[in-house]
Image: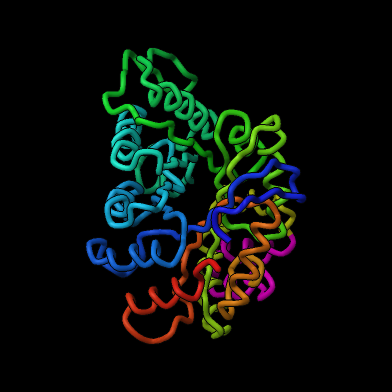
Amino acid sequence: MADTAAPSAATGQASVPRRYGMSVPFGGIPLGEQRDLVKEIEDLGYTDVWSSEADGSDAFTPLVLASQWAPSLRLGCAIVPAFTRGPALMAQSIGALAQAAPGRFAFGLGTSSNVIVERWNGIPFQEPYKKTRDVLRFLRAALAGEKVTETYDTVSIDGFRLGVVPPEPVPLLVAGLREGMLRLAGREGDGAIINWLAATDVAQVVKPVVDAGGGRPKEIVARIFVAPSTDTEAVYAGARFAIAAYLNVPVYAAFHQWLGRGDVLSGMWSAWQAGDRKAALAAIPDSLVDELIVHGSPEQCREHIERYLDNGVTTAALSIMPFGLQAGSKQEAVARALRDLAPR
């Protein structure tokens, strides 16, 4: 499944190599104790590891460790918020990791959300599209070694030159939930990072990226949430909490309105806004869990993941959800899940 050509009839995009990655680090296990798991990712035939940044590890530290623990894996951030680091510091972090792992690093940039940016970091969540666009443009110049003096709409840079220029170009990917950001990903980025969507949504989401790309191949990275368990009751219970936590955030609510799920989610949204969390969870139908969370036997999970790839995703970034995993230590449960989901 990994590293094969992926011409997509669903999107009409030119052939792009398929990649099959895993999200790191794994929750509940100290970061310094994850070496064996990262090595197992490499040994099992996964091609990538992808980090993120919300309320756990930062996006860079797990990838620095992985760069040394598993030297064949490509490393990616999905995503780093455009707001929470200064542009120069962000360029420094990218440049340093790109020098540590030449030619193996892809960087994902996005708006994040008002919760992470404003409530947790105390930074006004203003003009997110322009902020992401401006930081993207700055990074493109800075990572090429240019001295940047530029007044953008949301930030001014005066005379910055990066001292750790990557030895090879770093793909810059843009996280997109709706058409504006998706078109930015196609027009000015090297691809898009997509999140919290069903396999059947992929063609709708990828189309603006491809259209704006003007025929240039674009990588489409999808974070796909996977619970490799046949304990359906446990999966449904855990997944409802995860869905409610994300899809009540305004940017994700707007995304699913755009996807056409307004009617399906209206009950959850109404109960959540009324402060009735129990009713909000109960209003999430099993069918929505089945669409948004890959679960079941290893064979069922791989078939479901394949549908994302067939519909236009080029890089699957699997994220293991602990719902219904077999008893044992956290490390043992994650290792079993890695083996169950390994590319064939």
* Whether residue 98 is situated above or below residue 135 in the rendered picture: below
Question: In the image, 277: left or right of 55?
Answer: right
Write the residue at 26% across / 61% down.
31
Residue 238: x %, y % from top left: 50, 75
Q: Looking at the image, can residue 25 be seen?
A: yes
Q: Is residue 18 left or right of residue 204?
A: left
Asked which quadrant contains residue 333, the reply is bottom left
Q: Quadrant of the N terminus?
A: bottom right
**Quadrant where the C terminus lies?**
bottom right
Q: Residue at x 59, y 72 (%)?
A: 301
Residue closest to the far left? 32
- Colouring mode (rainbow / by chain / secondary structure / one colour): rainbow
Instruction: Note whether 120 is above or below 199 in the view shown.
Output: above
* Relative horizontal placement of residue 196, taking residue 147 as reference (left or right): right
In the rendered image, the vertical position of residue 198 relative to residue 159, given as above or below: below
Predominant secondary structure in magenta?
helix
Name the one closer to the observer, 162 or 158. Answer: 162
Q: Is residue 238 left or right of residue 124?
A: right
- Residue 10 position in % (x across, y down): 76, 50
| Residue closest to the eye, 117 or 36 | 36
Name the residue at 32% across, 27% down: 165
Residue lying at 64% horizontally and 57% vertically, measured from the top left: 309
Magenta residues span 263-289
Q: Above or below — where is 312 with respect to 242?
A: above
- Where residue 336 sits in the image (x, y, percent)? 42, 78
Q: Check if residue 267 falls in the magenta segment.
A: yes
Residue situated in front as seen by the camera: 111 or 108: 108
In the depicted view, which residue is nearer to us: 58 or 236? 58
Instruction: Inspect this view and state whether residue 275 appears.
Output: no
